[in-house]
């Protein structure tokens, strides 16, 4: 993966922010700093995207910024789940909207001739196993979680559908990012609805940060190296 000087400098800053969030999120006495560090992860990506996305079409630029904006909102809402369960539901809705925005972006470059049957079958097998673990503990969250699972599976599928239309670098970054997003949400779901996972806050945040980082870089890379935007 080739990075511009701006992207290299940003990558260092980004992972310093992620490390700071992991430390503050794991330390009770640093909760105030945690409230700043967590939303700063995606806000920094939004800043990079706005600064370096001059060659992107206005529609893709607007939708991507919306995806990042909904993600920041989701991050903020999920920080307050201990105060009320409604914050988790609202956070779920915010991230659902973020995934819908990413779906719209990915569909701009879909390969209409790409067969997705095999990939979809793999996703459904994975989702079925995850749902089997969670179903007895979901309660009132059953329908919202099912809807969310459908949307994130669709996001991963549309990321896969870009293959063959855009350059390999952009495709790989976005696709791997989408898979990391699925992994992050899966860890969160298992930790919340099935059983606590050791160091879950670290694994969730690392996979989530990588997901957003790779997706944003992938969208930017497509505009730099390919004219089909």
Image: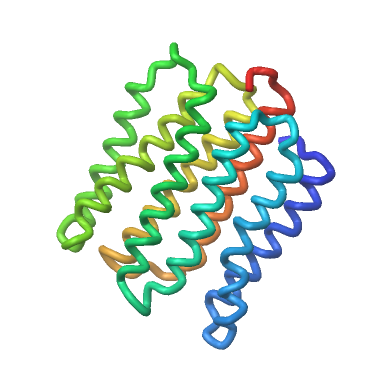
Could you tell me which residue is drawn at 79 percent across and 47 percent down? Answer: 8
In the image, residue 196 above or below residue 117: below
Residue at the image position 52 percent from the left and 85 percent from the top: 28
In this picture, is 82 found above or below 127? below
Query: Is residue 11 shown above or below 139?
Result: above
Color scheme of the displayed model: rainbow
Residue 111 on image: x %, y %: 48, 17
Pick the quarter of the image with the C terminus. top right
Near-viewer residue (23 or 55):
55
Relative side of 17 to 110, left or right: right
Q: Residue 204: in sight, yes or no?
A: no
Residue beneath the point at 71% across and 36% down: 1
Tell me: 52 left or right of 165. right
Q: Residue at x 47, y 33 (%)?
A: 104
- Residue 183 seen anywhere in this rendered image of the structure: yes
Which image quadrant for residue 56?
top right
Which residue reaches farthest bottom?
29
Q: Is residue 43 left or right of residue 156?
A: right
Q: Position of residue 157 (x, y in %)?
A: 41, 31
Horizontal side, residue 152 vs residue 129: left or right: right
Residue 48 x %, y %: 72, 48
Which quadrant of the figure has residue 191? bottom left
The residue most toward the top is: 113
Q: Position of residue 183 (x, y in %)?
A: 43, 50
Q: How many marks?
A: 0
Instruction: Name, please, the residue furthest toward the right.
Output: 5
């Amino acid at each position: 993966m080739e990075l511009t000087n701006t992207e290299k400098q940003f990558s260092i800053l980004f992972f310093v922010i992620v490390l700071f969030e992991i430390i503050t999120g794991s330390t009770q006495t640093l909760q105030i700093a945690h409230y700043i560090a967590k939303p700063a992860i995606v806000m920094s990506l939004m800043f990079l995207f706005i600064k370096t996305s001059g060659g992107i079409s206005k529609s893709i630029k607007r939708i991507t910024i919306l995806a990042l904006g909904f993600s920041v909102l989701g991050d903020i809402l999920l920080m307050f789940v201990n105060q009320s369960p409604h914050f988790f539901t609202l956070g779920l809705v915010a991230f659902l909207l973020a995934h819908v925005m990413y779906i719209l972006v990915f569909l701009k470059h879909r390969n209409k001739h790409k067969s997705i049957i095999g990939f979809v079958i793999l996703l459904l097998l994975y989702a079925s196993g995850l749902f089997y673990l969670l179903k007895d503990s979901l309660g009132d969250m059953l329908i919202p979680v099912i809807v969310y699972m459908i949307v994130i599976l669709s996001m991963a599928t549309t990321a896969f559908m870009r293959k063959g239309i855009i350059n390999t670098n952009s495709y790989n970054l976005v696709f791997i990012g989408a898979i990391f997003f699925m992994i992050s949400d899966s860890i969160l779901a298992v930790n919340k609805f099935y059983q606590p996972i050791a160091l879950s806050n670290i694994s969730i945040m690392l996979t989530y940060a990588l997901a957003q980082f790779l997706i944003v870089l992938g969208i930017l890379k497509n505009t730099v190296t390919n004219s089909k935007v």
